[in-house]
């Protein structure tokens, strides 16, 4: 099987397009491996597929094919004894890895995300969002009534923050602020990292009640520096819109920090596009 995520410039156009067309297979394969916790099971020692299958309650030959498929793209490797090991890439699927991407893998492969993408043609035809058509509500309303999906979503958002933190902290100096408000900040991973880097500012995490209630932040023990504020969805969107209007045009429409009404307040947005994509 060819590598469906290869970015090599010398790949012929038909082969490259084929890789893109079949990329969905890798998404689902990673999702299954993340759901089964394979990377965590391989944390301390390599294991045979029979042991992995018995531990996870799966069909050993099918699990072996899954792991070999993932090994072809750099996730996991099989040693001379036939046992599977982690690679630097698959370690990112571990729960406790400092840059864990397991949340993203679980979210993008989950049925409540996967199914709407399968109706993209209808969205393009009608202009109506897939989540609203399929579930009769917005994504955030859906998450509000499905705690397990909400937990995965918030884990995915924390994964994204962990991935981007070094770049954000290196690119922007937050030390000059007295108070930093993270609007729609999820479980507060970004805000917590900023406050750890800069000891002077105070921080306010603003998000929906269910999100704030489940946020676990080491700074909870510092009520002089860290505050949580729950708000309804309408007010949250209004706060984000206020930030977007104040941002530079090239910034993302979903800012992480929002200014207060104080005249010296300043918005800071995170643009995740690569430099060549901004032109």
Image (spheres, helix red, strand yellow):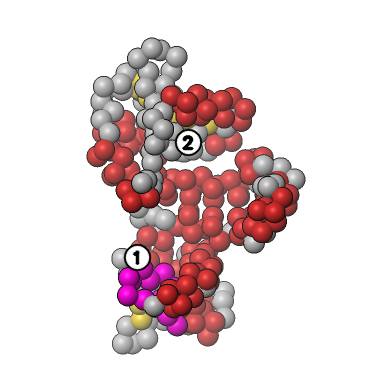
Horizontal arrangement in the rendering, residue 211 relative to residue 123 (left or right): left
Q: Could you tell me which residue is drawn at 47 percent across and 26 percent down?
A: 245
Residue 182 in view of the camera: yes
N-term-proximal mark, 1 vs 2: 1
Position in image of residue 64 (x %, y %): 48, 82
Q: Secondary structure at mark 2?
A: loop
- Which circle marks residue 253 in the picture? 2
> Which residue is tagged 1?
89
Horizontal arrangement in the rendering, residue 42 relative to residue 109 (left or right): left
Q: Main secondary structure of the magenta part?
A: loop
Q: Nearer the viewer, mark 1 or mark 2?
A: 2
Q: Secondary structure at mark 1?
A: loop
Gap in angstroms between the C-alphas marked 1 and 2: 30 Å
Q: As rendered, which of 268 and 57 lies closer to the eye? A: 268
Q: What residue span does the magenta drawing correspond to?
A: 1-11
In this view, the residue farthest toward the top is 263
Position in image of residue 187 (x %, y %): 46, 38
Position in image of residue 57 (x %, y %): 57, 74
Give the quadrant of the N terminus: bottom left
């Amino acid at each position: 099987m060819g590598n469906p995520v290869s970015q090599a410039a010398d790949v012929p156009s038909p082969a490259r397009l084929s890789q893109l067309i079949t990329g969905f297979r890798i998404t689902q394969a990673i999702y299954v491996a993340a759901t089964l916790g394979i990377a965590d099971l391989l944390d301390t020692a390599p294991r045979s597929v029979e042991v992995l299958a018995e531990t996870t309650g799966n069909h050993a030959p099918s699990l072996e094919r899954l792991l070999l498929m993932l090994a072809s793209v750099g996730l996991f490797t099989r040693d001379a004894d036939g046992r599977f090991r982690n690679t630097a890439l698959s370690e990112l699927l571990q729960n406790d890895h400092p840059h864990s991407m397991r949340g993203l893998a679980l979210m993008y492969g989950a049925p409540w995300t996967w199914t709407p993408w399968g109706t993209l043609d209808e969205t393009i035809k009608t202009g109506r969002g897939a989540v609203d058509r399929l579930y009769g509500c917005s994504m955030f309303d859906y998450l509000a009534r499905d705690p397990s999906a909400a937990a995965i979503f918030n884990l995915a958002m924390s994964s994204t923050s962990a991935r981007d933190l070094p770049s954000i902290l290196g690119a922007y100096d937050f030390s000059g602020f007295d108070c930093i408000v993270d609007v729609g900040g999820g479980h507060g991973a970004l805000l917590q990292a900023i406050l750890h880097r800069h000891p002077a500012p105070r921080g306010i995490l603003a998000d929906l009640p269910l999100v704030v209630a489940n946020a676990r932040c080491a700074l909870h023990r510092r009520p002089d520096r860290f505050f949580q504020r729950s708000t309804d969805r309408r007010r949250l969107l209004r706060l984000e819109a206020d930030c977007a209007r104040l941002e530079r045009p090239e910034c993302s429409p979903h800012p992480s920090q929002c200014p207060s009404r104080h005249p010296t307040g300043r918005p800071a947005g995170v643009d995740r596009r690569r430099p060549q994509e901004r032109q």
